[in-house]
Each structure stands twice: as structure tokens, then as C-alpha cells.
Image (tube, rainbow, N blue to C red):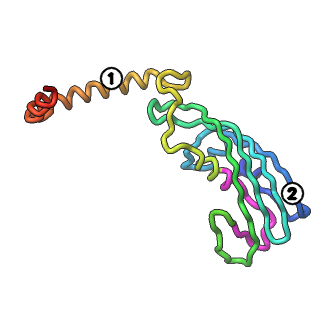
Amino acid sequence: MKSLQQYRIPFTGLKIGKHNFDLEVNEDFFQEFEYSLVKNGKLKVALELDKQETMLILQFHITGETFLTCDVCVSEFPTSVNIQERQIVKFGPEGTEADTEEILVLNKNDHEIDISPLIYEYVNLAVPYISRCEDVGNTRWCDKEMIQKLNKLSGSDQENRNQDADPRWEALKKIKNN
């Protein structure tokens, strides 16, 4: 958790108005989160904090690349990231639980905000549902040996299925082919 200290922004000493922060996210950041989809990446976070009387408006612009695991060949490959998000932070009395997706409520006694969970969430939500090398088997990132093994195993599995097929289906296949 010590590596996440840099993602704590003290806002009590800031004047009202806009303030810019530039942060970097790397492998150490993702290691702090146990079940992260992303294990490695090189990202730059440009944060614009707009401090107002009763709230903070955080504008995130996250760019760079993350390294994902291909669902086909199980090798790591880079994916570019370009994320823009906004988070509104309001101040409320202690025990207020009005957190929503767009509004985060902090205690009036809080003097800093930890943006690491927000960055983590934005980056992981940008991960595609199915992670694949761009051109399976033909890119420098793709594990060609794994693809060959998968093709070999799927081919022998297909032969086994054909041998175990019900003979009644063979008669139907002959009718279909004629």
C-alpha cells in the first residue's frame, strides 16, 4: 500500500479553482490490487481537479498501454488505452452514504482523496471482454507454439468425436450430401 501514497491528493491547502496533477501508473500500481485484470502497464494520468466551495470535480485523462493476457494463446500483448472520465466529489456529514457511480461523498473532516481506486476501476473497465492478440498466430506477441498445440489438440478431439458419433447420423449426412 505504500506505493499508492502518491495517488492521495491533499485538497485542503488548495485554492478554489483548477489544479493539474500528472501521475504515472506502472506494474507496481497493479500489484497492489489482488484480482486485477491488468497486471502490467505504462500509463500517464492527467488529472484536473476543480475545487469549488462545496465539491470537487475530477477530470481524468489516462493514456498509455496495458499488457493483457490473450485468451487464445495465453501470451501477454500490449493494448493502447485512452480513457476520459469525470468524478464528482461532494462533502457531507459523517455517515452519509450517497455514493453513486458519478458522485462520491467524503466526510467534511477529510483532507485528502485517494484516487487509486478510481484509476484502477477506469483502467479495468477499459479492458475488452475478450482479450485477443490482434492477429492470432501472426504477430510478434502471439505464442505460435501454443497455437500449434491448440490446433493439434482440437484436431485430435474432432477425430474422437467423429469416431464416437451415432451411426444413425451417418445415414442422415448421406441424405444431406445427395
Depth order, front residue of 116/102 = 102
* Element assignment for label 1: helix
Camera-side mark, 1 or 2: 2
Q: Residue at x 74, y 51 (%)?
A: 60
Q: Disc 1 or 2, which lies upstream in sequence?
A: 2
Q: What is the magenta range?
A: 104-119
Name the amino acid type tagged 2.
Answer: Lys
Q: Is residue 150 left or right of residue 128?
A: left
Please say whether residue 116 is one of the residues in the magenta stretch: yes
Tell me the quarter of the picture where residue 102 sits. bottom right
Q: Which residue is mark 1?
A: 152
Q: Residue at x 81, y 57 (%)?
A: 49
Question: Where residue 146 sits in the image (x, y, percent)?
Answer: 43, 25
Name the amino acid type tagged 1.
Answer: Lys
Question: Where residue 51 sits in the image (x, y, percent)?
Answer: 84, 63
Q: Which residue is mark 2?
A: 18
Q: Which residue is farthest front? A: 178
Q: Quadrant of the C terminus?
A: top left
Q: Residues within 10 Å of mark 2 (few under 14, many from 20)?
A: some
Depth order, front residue of 103/76 = 103
